[in-house]
Image (cartoon, grey):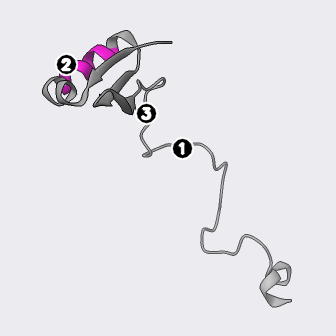
Amino acid sequence: MSGKTVGAAQFKAECLKLIDEMARDHLPVTITKRGRPVAVLTPVDAPQRSLIGLMEGSVSGYDDPFAPVVEPSEWDALA
């Protein structure tokens, strides 16, 4: 997977356009400074999921949320 190489000044001037092209083409953009690579901007493969609701459905049931999960005699801190 190759991609596009741009100088830092060009990236600064055309940042939003280059990001849009990268998202469309799914190719990384290498940013150079004085001809040497200093950064690589890569497209995101999968859409980011929101943290809100991420654990929904992972708990099947819990009757008393204030009761201990295990008996106090099973705690390592008491040993």
Residue picked out by circle 3: 48
Circle on res. 56:
1
Q: Nearer the viewer, mark 3 or mark 2?
A: 2
* Disc nearer the start of the sequence (3/2): 2
x then y, percent, for residue 11: 22, 27
Circle on res. 17:
2
Quarter occupied by the C terminus: bottom right
Inspect the image, locate mark 2, and give the three-letter code of the amino acid beneath it.
Lys
Q: In this view, does 35 lie to the left or right of 16?
A: right
* Disc nearer the start of the sequence (1/2): 2
x then y, percent, for residue 69: 72, 70
Read off the magenta span: 15-23
Which residue corresponds to the image point at 81% horizontal and 89% vertical from the top-left?
78
Counting labels gives 3
Q: Is residue 40 left or right of residue 12?
A: right
Q: Mark 1 packing: few (<14 Cα in 10 Å), some, or many (20+)?
A: few
